[in-house]
Image (cartoon, helix red, strand yellow):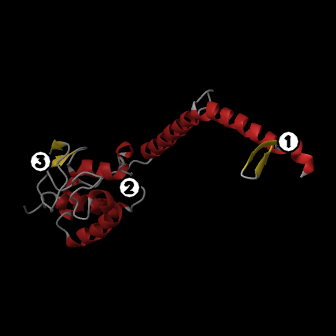
Amino acid sequence: MAQFEDKVLHELDGIKEYDNPMPGWLMAIWWGSLVFAAAYLGFYALSFGEGSMEAEYRAETQQSLAAVQTHFDAHPLVPPKAADLLAGAKNPAVLDLAAARFAKSCAPCHGAQAQGLIGPNLTDDRWIHGGQVEQIFQTIAKGWPAKGMPPWGRAMKPEELSALVSYVRSLQGSNPPNPKPAEGDPVVPEPLPGS
């Protein structure tokens, strides 16, 4: 203890505080951390420099969307005839197939009874992207990614896709409890066969 007597800065209640310098390696890490933090803040957080990660992300997203659109253009989904889709809305076998697929893929956003949750209500007479069966087919097949609706056209078998359109059409006017308020333009749906 005698060797530190000349370096004692404070003494309080018998506790002595010594002025021992930090080791050089620890000071190097500390100063290096400060320099790294300043460089990181300047480059990433404040976006100095052209190589912004956000700009790169946006460019890659646009490239991916263009690739998907090119694929759809080369392999268009041809909807069945409106009469076939409308006839499916009265066919119990088609509706059973579609109800299972709706519960799996659509109910998380549109609700179990299509009353609307995150997605719009599918049972009223208002539609954001058109309520005719051909328009419903295109909406389900191609989706509206900007609004959160995924494209299901390549994720479903063609018969499931057609059945789902028929099922959605069969739900129009079902008036489920607690529906989401109407969105979109009013549409007069095509009459179902035998109606």
Residue 170 locus on image (x, y percent): 18, 61
Pointer 1 with pointer 3, Cβ within 8 A: no
Residue at figure coordinates x 43%, y 46% from the top left: 72
Residue 29 locus on image (x, y percent): 78, 42
Q: Residue furthest right?
A: 3
Residue at figure coordinates x 16%, y 66% from the top left: 90
Pointer 3 with pointer 2, Cβ within 8 A: no
The residue labelled by disc 1 is 7
Q: Which mark is residue 152?
A: 2
- Can residue 111 be seen by looking at this rendering? yes
Q: Nearer the viewer, mark 2 or mark 1?
A: 1
Neighbourhood count class around disc 3 (C-alpha, 10 Å): few under 14, some 14–19, many 20 upward? few
The residue labelled by disc 3 is 188
N-term-proximal mark, 2 vs 1: 1
What is the spatial separation of the Cα atoms under label 3 and label 2, in whole angstroms? Answer: 25 Å
N-term-proximal mark, 1 vs 3: 1
Q: Residue furthest left?
A: 195
Q: In the rendered structure, which amino acid carries the disc numbered 2?
A: Trp
What is the spatial separation of the Cα atoms under label 2 and label 1, in whole angstroms? Answer: 75 Å
Residue 44 locus on image (x, y percent): 61, 35
Give 39 or 161, whichever is nearer the viewer. 39
Q: In the rendered structure, which amino acid carries the disc numbered 1?
A: Lys
User: Toward which corner of the image does residue 154 lie, by quadrant?
Assistant: bottom left
Give 64 or 82, whichever is nearer the viewer. 64
Give 152 or 126, whichever is nearer the viewer. 126
Residue at figure coordinates x 20%, y 43% from the top left: 184
- As displayed, is residue 113 above or below residue 74? below
Q: Residue furthest front?
A: 13
